[in-house]
């Protein structure tokens, strides 16, 4: 007696269809689960037996073997309970249905037969639709998430008996439908953060607008209380809205991580992740025996904010270099290798010195030059090379703080950012993996960011007289291109280059004073 039920297992942000084969023979009572299951999957044996007995069915005696194929793919998670239970019921003749060949199912079973939520439902739904399956059975809490994939008929259930009734065509149930457009219409309606709350700092807001327009990484340097964190938390409010593809990518990452809010179907807002400075290397970029995404992947298509950058462990910062460059992070372990997307806008902040205020070499009781060098050495040159804009943030004056005039709203800034991004979308149409100016390769920079004689002369003087490093050259060209896009200019003019140069303060010789 043999039964075959289809389930799925996540591998990175994708899923693989799993054949759950159940076989029964006479002999001593035993249950064997094969196919590289992890501990959570192995423990399904006891949950499945109790659920079957407590729902009015009988658990067959004898030797039962459940095989999770393909056998060389590690299986992890709690979603195999339901398909194993259905396989046993079908194999033992207690379930008669012709729907199993066109249905994928997953869910954890409680001992009384209730179906509990699982993680990674959206990647499973995408894979099931791609493989041509018609139906998907999921826990009720995961129904909205699965219904985002319109090519499938999604049936959310609360109990094992409901699944049995549906498979045997007892009663009628309509598949769950999802209105994806409605999720996007609700986006940003009740956001309490707005740039109009920020008093003063017009030069910093201008720099952040440029960063958002071109997807540039940025670092803000200023004393405590100058508003660095306040402004960083408002950056997502000026970024362009997520596209459907970006929303699906982001939701898949949160789904496989198990942190998608209960009952939430789709993430439609840009993510803002702010890990603590004690974060480990694995927590930042991902890892584990079965690799899971880290903070840099959780912030995919959004903002990764590193507050007080020099306080982070140097090893944690160094492992981010390649993901920032490639837009993805590959994690290799003995059992498997996975790749998670990590296309983020890195926003960092730091104090200008260990004491918190600007460095003054003539101050007797201030920070020494050696202390300053040690402080800044925590940030390596290669990491700084991946940050396009360096912004000096000064304290806000009393007049600006007490003034009644409100700053420009996030909505007004966002309109300009969206227009600049539309120009870039047309420019990079057909180029895979390039969506903004910050993602241009060196060859593309030479092609797209051509300067006139006046612009070239200004850049030459900046590099020679201000002591700008060689690595600043491409970054200045990219930022200049973004400034020109905000100005709706096809050509990069000398004023665009001049504005970009002022955002490379950390590259200047003698910046320490």
Image (cartoon, rainbow, N blue to C red):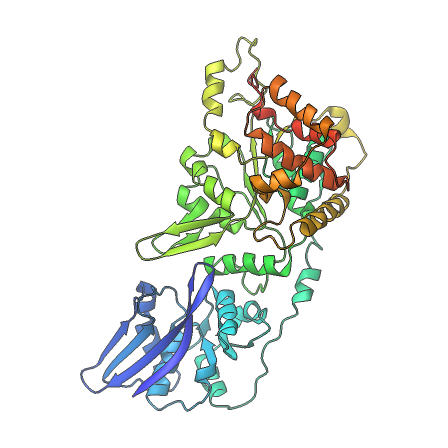
Q: Image quadrant of residue 21? A: bottom left
**Residue sitting at the far right:** 405
Instruction: Evaluate whether residue 55 shows in this view.
Output: yes
| Placement of the C terminus among the 4 image quadrants | top right
Residue 148 x %, y %: 59, 68
Q: At which x and y percent is residue 310?
A: 49, 30
Image height of 65 relative to 264, above or below: below
Q: Residue at x 36, y 56 (%)?
A: 290
- Picture coordinates of residue 278, whole percent (x, y): 44, 38
Tell me: residue 328, above or below residue 305: below
Residue sitting at 28 percent across and 83 percent down? 23
For residue 276, above or below residue 119: above
Q: Nearer the viewer, residue 168 or 454?
A: 454
Could you say where residue 193 lies in the image, as x and y percent from the top left? 68, 45
Does the image show residue 112? Answer: no
Please name whichever residue, 268 or 260, is drawn nearer the observer in this view of the structure. Answer: 268
In the figure, 337 relative to 115: above or below?
Answer: above
Asked whether, in this view, residue 97 is left or right of residue 126, the answer is left
**Count of marks, rendered view:** 0
For the point 62% across and 49% down, the residue is 435
Using the rendered view, name the quadrant where residue 477 is placed.
top right
Q: Nearer the viewer, residue 365 or 489?
A: 489
The structure residue drawn at horizontal position 49% and vertical position 77%, both measured from the top left corner, is 137
Say which quadrant the N terminus sits in.
bottom left
């Amino acid at each position: 007696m043999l039964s075959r039920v289809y389930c799925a297992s996540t591998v990175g942000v994708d899923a693989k269809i799993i054949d759950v084969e159940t076989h029964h023979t006479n002999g001593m009572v035993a249950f064997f689960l094969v196919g590289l299951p992890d501990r959570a999957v192995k423990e399904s044996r006891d949950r499945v037996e109790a659920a079957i007995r407590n729902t009015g069915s009988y658990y067959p005696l004898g030797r039962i073997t459940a095989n999770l194929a393909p056998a060389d793919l590690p299986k992890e998670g709690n979603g195999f309970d339901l398909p194993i239970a259905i396989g046993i019921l079908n194999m033992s003749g207690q379930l008669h249905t012709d729907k199993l060949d066109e249905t994928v199912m997953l869910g954890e079973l409680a001992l009384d037969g209730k179906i509990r939520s699982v993680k990674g439902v959206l990647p499973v739904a995408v894979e099931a639709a791609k493989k041509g399956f018609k139906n998907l059975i999921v826990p009720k809490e995961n129904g909205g998430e699965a219904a985002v994939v319109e090519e499938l008929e999604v049936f959310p259930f609360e109990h094992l008996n409901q699944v049995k009734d549906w498979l045997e065509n007892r009663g009628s149930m309509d598949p769950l439908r999802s209105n994806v457009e409605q999720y996007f219409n609700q986006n940003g309606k009740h956001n309490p953060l707005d740039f109009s709350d920020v008093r003063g700092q017009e030069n910093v807001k201008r720099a952040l607008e440029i960063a958002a327009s071109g997807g540039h990484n940025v670092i803000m340097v200023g004393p405590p209380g100058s508003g660095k964190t306040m402004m960083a938390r408002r950056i997502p409010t000026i970024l362009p809205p997520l596209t459907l593809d970006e929303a699906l990518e982001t939701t898949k990452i949160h789904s496989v991580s198990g942190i998608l809010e209960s009952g939430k179907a789709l993430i439609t807002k840009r993510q803002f992740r702010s890990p603590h400075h004690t974060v480990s290397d694995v927590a930042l970029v991902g890892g584990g025996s079965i690799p899971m995404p880290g903070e840099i992947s959780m912030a995919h298509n959004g903002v990764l904010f590193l507050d007080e950058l020099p306080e982070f462990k140097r090893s944690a910062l160094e492992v981010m270099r390649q993901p920032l460059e490639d837009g993805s992070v590959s994690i290799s372990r003995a059992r498997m290798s996975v790749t998670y997307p990590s296309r983020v806008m890195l926003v960092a902040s730091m104090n200008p010195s260990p004491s918190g205020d600007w460095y003054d070499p003539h101050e007797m009781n201030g920070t020494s030059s050696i202390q300053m060098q040690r402080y800044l050495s925590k940030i390596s040159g290669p990491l700084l090379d991946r940050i396009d804009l360096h912004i000096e943030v000064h304290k806000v004056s009393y007049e600006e703080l007490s003034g009644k005039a409100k700053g420009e709203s996030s909505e007004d800034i966002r309109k300009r950012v969206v227009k600049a991004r539309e120009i870039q979308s047309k420019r990079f149409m057909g180029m895979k993996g390039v969506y903004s100016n910050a993602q241009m390769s060196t060859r593309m920079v030479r092609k797209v960011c051509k300067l006139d004689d006046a612009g070239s002369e200004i850049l030459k003087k900046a590099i020679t007289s201000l002591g700008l490093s060689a690595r600043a050259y491409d970054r200045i060209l990219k930022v200049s291109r973004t400034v020109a896009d905000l100005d709706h200019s096809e050509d990069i003019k000398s004023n665009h280059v001049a504005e970009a140069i002022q955002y490379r303060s950390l590259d200047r010789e003698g910046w320490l004073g």
